[in-house]
Amino acid sequence: MPEHFDLPAQDTDRVFRIGLLTDIHFGNDSLRARQELAFCRMDSLGLRLLCLMGDIVDNALSDNYETARRLVNKLNTPMLALTGNHEVFPLSLPVEACLANFRTGMGRPRHYAWRYFDPYLFVFLGIDQREPHLPKTRRDTGTSEQQLQWLRATLQAHAQTPTVIVSHAPLENTVEDSDHFPLAASSQLYDILGEAPQVFLWLSGHTHLPDVHCGESLKTAVALGSGCTFVHVPPVADYYVHVIKGDRQFFRGGEDLQTRLLTCHPDRIEVQTYDILANALQPMVTVRPTIRRASAA
């Protein structure tokens, strides 16, 4: 049964929650009520951090960021924002200009980052490159060589720290529809991941797939890799794209509004589905680090 709850203050500093919101699409006025409810509910949960996982805005034009700031500036929760493919739209605007608008609009120094919350390292990857030579569904989910080098160096520097990665789009051949809408640099990222056994959890959005379309018991919302669990995060937006027998099908929902919470314990992370409309929490999957690091006394 779902747990209907008002989250209490966290019991100790050793247990904390991180919240995720993806595919919010500020600038689309039809989503305003969903956006406001999602931010209000997430801000009430006593989170250590709220990560906005990309596609925060419909495109990189400044008026969309003005809409986003009206809600973001009300947050009492620490917030970190990433770029998705819509942060590097429109195509008429150079990518660097889009990224500059993101930095100004969201008040962030850059579009990727890492944070350490004992005992875990959290690595957040953004979209920052277009790949015009690739098929349409891959050309706008690029990862620059600079960011790939930063990721490899970050993981090498924290080789003994259990690590969680959050990205806008999924790695190819992980969660459902990731074969149709993957990160363009999936091949390079798999190489980096192969050198980093400490990475035990990867979360992504981008596919606009609600849990109701993720198969029986959410099996296709969770994919198990070699020592790493991949988890899909549903969108705030209520319009979806799903590939059925090779065809892209568009449909609208609205009857659900869900996301993921990470409840982080010293020896495990509980990935939970948070039903924003019902204020209800359900367990999804529990993952344990492949590398244990002794915590500071």
Image: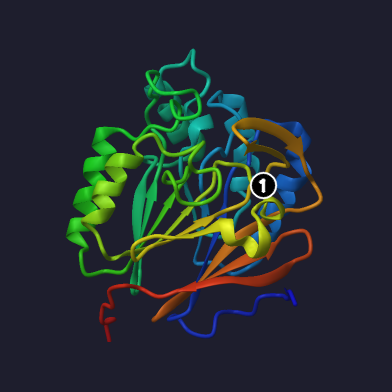
Please determine whether, in this image, residue 258 is positioned above or below residue 184.
below
Name the side, left or right, on which 74 lies relative to 267: right
The residue depicted at 65 percent of the width and 41 percent of the height is 70
Residue neighbourhood size for the residue with mark 1, other residues' Cα within 10 Å, grouped as few (<14), some (14–19), many (≥20):
many
| Image coordinates for residue 112, horizontal then vertical, percent | 37, 44
Q: Give the total of numbered labels.
A: 1
**Residue 43 can be seen, yes or no:** no
The residue depicted at 65 percent of the width and 65 percent of the height is 217
Please determine whether, in this image, residue 181 is positioned above or below residue 296.
above
**Residue 185 can be seen, yes or no:** yes
Residue on which the image places disc 1? 236
- In which quadrant is the N terminus drawn? bottom right
Q: How is the image coloured?
A: rainbow
Name the side, left or right, on which 51 lies relative to 208: left
Camera-side residue of 51 and 269 = 269
Please determine whether, in this image, residue 217 is positioned above or below residue 292.
above
Please determine whether, in this image, residue 272 is positioned above or below residue 294.
above
**Tag 1 secondary structure:** loop
Q: Name which quarter of the figure residue 268 lies in.
A: bottom left
- In which quadrant is the C terminus drawn? bottom left
Q: Residue furthest right?
A: 255
Camera-side residue of 109 and 5 = 5
Q: Residue furthest front?
A: 245
| Image coordinates for residue 204, horizontal then vertical, percent | 49, 50
Name the side, left or right, on which 214 lies relative to 16: right
| Image coordinates for residue 34, horizontal then vertical, percent | 75, 47
| Image coordinates for residue 69, horizontal then vertical, percent | 60, 40
Q: Name which quarter of the figure residue 129 lies in.
A: top left
Three-letter code, disc 1: Val
The residue depicted at 79 percent of the width and 64 percent of the height is 278
